[in-house]
Amino acid sequence: MNDKTPSVQLTPFTFDERQVRVIQGEDGEPLFVAADVLAALSLDRKALERLDDDEKGVSSIHTPGGRQNVVVINEPGLFGLVLGSRKPEAKRFKRWVTHEVLPAIRQTGGYQLPTTQPDQARLTGELALLECFCTLNNPAPSSRVVLLEKIGSAHGLNTAWLPGYVEDAPDAGQGSLDTDSATALLAEFGVRITTPVFNQRLAAMGLLERRNRKARSGTKSYWCVTDEGQAYGKNITAPQSPRETQPHWYRDRFLDLLALVGMEGAA
């Protein structure tokens, strides 16, 4: 397989409540995101070492944090992992893929959930929750699209029309600017300051604020970019929890952000 092959993401499906994403290569070949398959089969990454080079590769997919390169495996690689697994779920996984997923992909171009009509009451409730989440946390437009895609996919709805490109920048015409976390950007720009201290300075300037959500242990707090801060960054859905947002800062504006809070970068 060729590395970093341009690809079109198909509708994700679920096996035992685990999401397994399938994308389509240039030749129409279904490619499975390796991390999702390993999780479904309870395997670690060492299992990929058993696969030949033509059974695995790297492709680009859309994630809440933007486009990212991920390891993917083709059908021979998928069945190589299944046959090499002694886990009880491996047999069920193979049967489900061969009897439901692959036939559906080849017939319709994407996996269709078994239901033919969405649960209207549940769909309405989930959309209302999404609206509340967006009001409370103000996530970036790209994150809102990802959340809509998840809701639509869960109800068997066609989400192919949702845009893969969304305007995230505060000024029209800027495009979806490249972003990263404060921790990564502080290291990249050579700023000798810890992320908690940096966040406190941003909060003092009114660019960040604390939000709270319920957790098993009581209440958990997290950072959220304010309206003023959106000139320099945006809120994405936190990878560790879909009920939180995580601040991401525009790489091209990070030096301006540092200057605003009285710091300088080495790069």
Image (cartoon, rainbow, N blue to C red):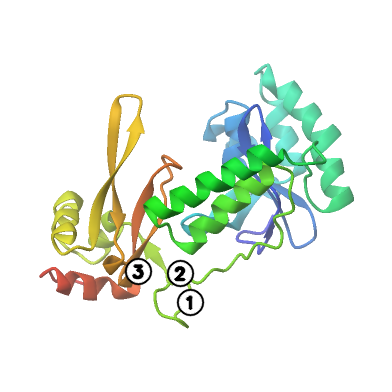
Would residue 50 appear left or right of 212 to someone viewing this image? right
Q: Earlier in the sequence, mark 2 or mark 1?
A: 2
Q: Residues within 10 Å of mark 3 (few under 14, many from 20)?
A: many
Q: Give the residue displayed 46% in from the left and 42% down from the top.
A: 242
Counting from the top left corner in percent of width and height, residue 198 is at 17, 57
Q: Give the residue displayed 73% in from the left and 58% down from the top.
A: 25
Would residue 212 appear left or right of 42 to someone viewing this image? left
To which residue does mark 3 refer?
250
What amino acid is at disc 2?
A: Asp
SS of the residue under disc 3: strand
Q: Give the residue displayed 57% in from the left and 28% down from the top.
A: 43
Q: Residue furthest bottom?
A: 173
To which residue does mark 1 refer?
175
Residue 177's image quarter? bottom left
Q: Residues within 10 Å of mark 2 (few under 14, many from 20)?
A: many
Vertical comparison of 238 with 9: above or below: above
Let me know if residue 51 appears in the view. Answer: no
- Pair 2/3: label in front: 2
Vertical comparison of 242 with 170: above or below: above
Camera-side residue: 205 or 127? 127
Estimate the spatial distance between the alpha carbons at disc 2 and disc 3, rounded to whole Å: 10 Å
Would residue 201 appear left or right of 184 to someone viewing this image? left
Estimate the spatial distance between the alpha carbons at disc 1 and disc 3, rounded to whole Å: 11 Å
Quadrant in which the C terminus is drawn: bottom left
To which residue does mark 2 refer?
168
SS of the residue under disc 1: loop
SS of the residue under disc 2: loop
